[in-house]
Image (cartoon, coloured by chain):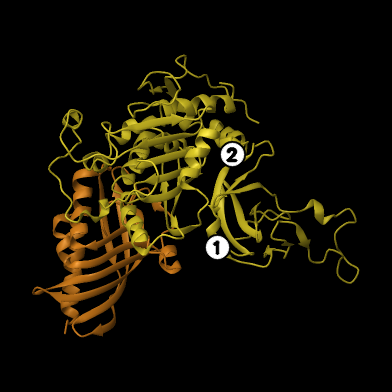
Chain colours: A orange, B yellow
Amino acid sequence: MIDRDAMRDFYDDYYTTLDDVRLEEWPAFFTENCLYRVIPRENFEAGYTLSTIFAESRGMLIDRVMGVTKTQMFAPRYYRRFPGPLRIVSRDGDSVRTRHNLLVVQTLIDKKTDIVLSAVCHDLIIPDEDRLRFRERIVVFDSEMIPNSLIYPA
Amino acid sequence: MNTISRIWPDDANGKVPYWVYSDPDIYAAELQRIWYGPHWLFCALEAEIPNVGDFKTTTLGERPVIVVRSAPTEVSVVENRCAHRGVKFCQARKGHVKDLLCPYHQWNYSLRGDLQGAPFRRGVRGQGGMPPDFDPKNHSLRKLKVEVVNGLVWATFSDETPPFRDYLGERFWQHYTRVYDGRKLEVLGYNRQHIPGNWKLMQENIKDPYHASLLHVFFVTFGLFRADQKSATEVDPTGRHGILISRTGKQEVNDVTSTMRNYKNDIRLADPRILDVVKEFPDDDAVGMITVFPSVVLQQNINSLSIRSIVPTGPGGFDFHWTHWCYADDTPEMRLRRTRQANLFGPAGFVSADDGEIIAMSQEGFAKSPDEDGLVIMGGRDIESVDHMVTEVGIRGMYRYWREVMGPL
């Protein structure tokens, strides 16, 4: 059984990795077959699957990192993620469903800090190859109007 | 109406002065002459309001409107502004109603926007009430002219706007009906972003294949849109509408890609399902990006179909609403394919995020230099459709039309 401390360490590690922009380490937090969505609340509630970011495998997450680091053009910025208290929703065997709120803020050069996403994360975590991994991570954001771009993952 | 005191540069087709993007008087005149003038504005997919009483709210120019199915075969578009005291009374994005009701004084309108009831009109116990000259017929919601064209709802504030098909012109009617061919459509989902740049920059962006073949490394590298591919850049006779057409190519080093510093032969996709493209239209064109002036981009880019609507919020910004859709008879596999390919587009799109970023950088670059000019002479100074993408003809065409409507300038 995954205990709460292990889960807390997993999330701390995940968010530190992203805040430090160690993007090449990010896909390893997910199982080979996984589901990752960053999706507007209006789509989620209407049952639409169209997402702002959508991946069905660790490979697609690797491609997302390749896209951001090697193909996309964007102004430099800092992202910082503020997760709220973690709630364990259910357990099924070794897997755990959790939810927590997430605020993602960005700071562009010479600009005030902006909220990029105000979201809730619905995650499914499983033990995989001697560590914990996301089998599913669905980030549902309330934000009605993204301030221009969403560059880095949540 | 404000008079415009600005002078257009001498090289009329070849230059665009930067005041068009930042002058508040120009912006105010654009709202009146373009957005509230004789132009069709995109409102909704018919599929968003299938039943009588279904509505959605949106914004045309800067004005909030309600798009409502008022009869089984009729869609009405009315301003979301009570005829009594001006309240934007409908705050929901979508819903279903029997009538339109303002919560302030309970004025109540039919689905077509006619005033049906104003409480205490005849007073209470002989006191108050509306004066005898009050006639409900004079106090309906402002109604827009509407056309529903193969699944899309269009509206205009002006009585002088020609029928939608004439507005597009015959050639662009063919482009429109290639994708909007009368089949039923369904919504796949939405994306919304605010881009801190003038609204015309979004129109320019999709009229400018020169940049697409250079800025968008993802397109260039995987051969989705690149200067060595068979392509066309068309403008309608007025210059206001445009389309970029392209066939796809390969990730290959050739005489053109070898000269492009943004072509990357060494990157590979770990999971290439995003590029699992199927041919679905009778011709061989893989991309058809239509700009319908002034409000919308109709995207057919590989199998990703979307409608991107522009809502100006001042000279220096606009909201950008994406409605991704599919055909109602699409298989689950096709829906998944379109959903997957949507990773290329929207605020986090491998390609489209570049556009929001470059538009913001453009606005930052010229906002404080209104008297300088930008150059749009790639491909010459003519305004004629061409069978390649090394051109800025679409931008030249739009500004020739813009000068006619706004001036003459």
The CA distance from mark 2 to mark 1 is: 28 Å
Vertical arrangement, residue A126 with respect to residue B337, above or below: below
Q: In this view of the protein, which residue sits in the foreground, A111 or A46?
A: A46
Position of B188 with respect to B150 (left or right) is left
Q: Residue at x 60, y 65 (%)?
A: B51
Position of B166 with respect to A122 (left or right) is right
- Give coordinates of residue A105: x percent, y percent: 31, 56
Q: Residue at x 57, y 62 (%)?
A: B50
**Which label number is shown at residue B368?**
none
**Which label number is shown at residue B165?**
2
Question: Mark 1: which amino acid?
Answer: Lys
Residue marked by disc 1: B94
First in sequence, mark 2 or 1: give its number: 1
Q: Quadrant of residue A97?
A: bottom left
Q: Is residue B31 visible?
A: no
Same chain check for tags 2 and 1: yes
Q: In this view of the protein, which residue sits in the foreground, A142 or A96?
A: A96
Secondary element type, mark 2 = helix
Q: Is residue B247 visible?
A: yes
Position of B93 with respect to A47 (left or right) is right
Q: In this view of the protein, which residue sits in the foreground, B287 or A56?
A: B287
The number of numbered badges drawn on the structure is 2
